[in-house]
Image: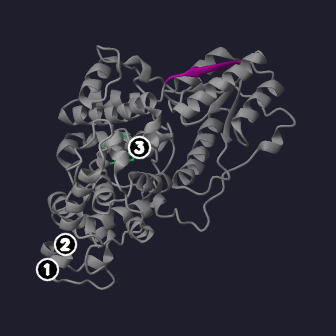
Amino acid sequence: SRGIYWFRRDLRLADNPALERACRSHDELLLVYVDEARDAGVTAGRAWLRRSLDSLSADIARIGGRLHVLAGSAERVIPALAGAAGAEAVHVSALHEPAADARDLRMAQALARDGVAMRRSAGRLMTEPEMVLSKVSTPYRVFTPFLKAARPGWRHRPRAAPERLACFGLPSGMQRLQTSIAAPEPDWDRGFWEVWTPGERHAQQRLERFLERLDAYPGERDCPAVEATSRLSPHLHFGEISPARALEAAQRRGGPGADKFIAELGWREFAYYVLNHWPDSTTENFNPRFDGIDWRHDEAWLDAWRHGRTGVPLVDAGMRQLWHEGWMHNRVRMVVASYLTKHMGIHWSSGASWFMHTLVDADLANNTLGWQWVAGSGVDAAPYHRVFNPVAQSRRFDPAGAYLRRWLPELRRLDDSEIHAPWETGASPHGYPARPIVDLATGRAEALERLARAPKPA
Ligand code: FAD
């Protein structure tokens, strides 16, 4: 029989339960990716996707198959393909994003009317969001009890990639949909490829390299100048590696580094859990108290933040790392998000939207959780009065200023005592703002007043 395998955010061959099921169920497969975002503009994620698909195509070709990248709306393309190819079923990995899942359901119903089954398998998460509830049958709002309840279910033996793929070609009449994803122009993504190589093989290599340094992870993971974290986030986002494989490898390695790393994978599970139980949280404050805050609308400030020109070295270094590499260290993500939402008083959604455009790991669930956590408006969020002091953070986590010097050439000549807060010592480096766009003490006080002024919801 014939089946269709529709790749989405599971751009891998190994440990892919949906693909394994498709191979088991059919004699021949048609492998497709549907590019639906051609007109949605350039993003860092799209630049990654382009290379990830190239890598997947090459891996598929190596085992005798072929990947077809098609343009159009999946809701039209997939049923048309299934009909033209005489396919029995369409196989996918579940995305676990409410809007996408609702669309899958509609598509499954439409396909069923034509006698085609849609087979969805898990693989993107280790915890199906519906499967974990508290004793009173409500979803968890706090991470630690969620992790405690979810983790015992994370047992997994990774599966190998298929050895051969028996594929059939695109039905005639469908060839006109073939496309490829264009490179960004101008090549603003070139900095990305100094540090990243998309694709399954590199995801596995990253994991292996990280495991060699796993013991240092708990002690060094907060230092942005050190490469102490796994940097698996874009690979996980695009499904080039399964979280279960990362979990299993860390468990096998063991020790306190493994526990800490598994807890971080747990935050990803929690982010998807929250997104599924509270789908509105991508746009609405989880805590309605925040609806009454009088947020500031200031394009010039927002622009200075986006482009690393706030005059606060750690904030600017982070925003420039983001622009250059398409990624930012987690500690610095917290600091830049805090400066935007607290000191500048700008709504978290403006920052979240910039991150969604510029991060190679841009992920609706993780990004929403991260922003609402820092803003104080989210599930199990940081208390609102916890306003990160970017200078104290810089002195603590980058004491020798190595991260700052790397991203802020204007400050390279300052010594360690000046670099974290140049305005305090009267150093005014050429080409760098003479003082922060928002003074740290004033910004903090105003942030606290802003919440105090917000009317309490009835
Ligand atoms: P590691 O420390 O090696 O962690 C391993 C994996 O665990 C990560 O790859 C990631 O998948 C997961 N993880 C780690 N920390 C978190 C977390 N706090 N929340 C959810 N998952 C986590 N992560 C994204 O993948 N995409 C985003 O769009 C994103 N936006 C964020 C926005 C803000 C404001 C903040 C504060 C955090 C955001 N994060 C996001 C979470 C975190 O910063 C990144 O996952 C992490 O920096 C990726 O680096 P790593 O792979 O080296 O992490």
Residue shown at the point (19%, 31%) measured from the top left: 255
- Give the x, y percent position of residue 383: 22, 44
Residue that carries the numbered disc 3 in the rendered image: 368
Q: Nearer the viewer, residue 113 or 438?
A: 438
Q: Nearer the viewer, mark 2 or mark 3?
A: 3
Q: Residues within 10 Å of mark 1 (few under 14, many from 20)?
A: few
In the image, the segment drawn in magenta is 116-122
Residue shown at the point (32%, 31%) measured from the top left: 266
Residue shown at the point (46%, 64%) measured from the top left: 191
Q: Quote the CA–CA distance across marks 2 and 1.
A: 8 Å
- Give the x, y percent position of residue 401: 20, 67
Residue shown at the point (46%, 35%) measured from the top left: 241
Looking at the rendering, which quadrant does residue 368 occupy?
top left
Which numbered tag is attached to residue 169?
none
Task: Report if residue 407 lies within the magenta region.
Answer: no
Q: Secondary structure at mark 1?
A: helix
Q: Main secondary structure of the magenta part?
A: strand
Q: Quote the CA–CA distance across marks 2 and 3.
A: 30 Å
Image-based side of 117 in relation to 392, left or right: right
Q: Quadrant of ligand 1?
A: top left
Which numbered tag is attached to residue 425?
1
Q: Nearer the viewer, residue 355 or 402?
A: 355
Marks 2 and 1: CB-CB under 8 Å? yes
The amino acid type found where label 2 is placed reads Ala
Q: Quote the CA–CA distance across marks 1 and 3.
A: 38 Å
Q: Is the CB of the residue bearing disc 3 within 8 angstroms of ligand 1?
A: no
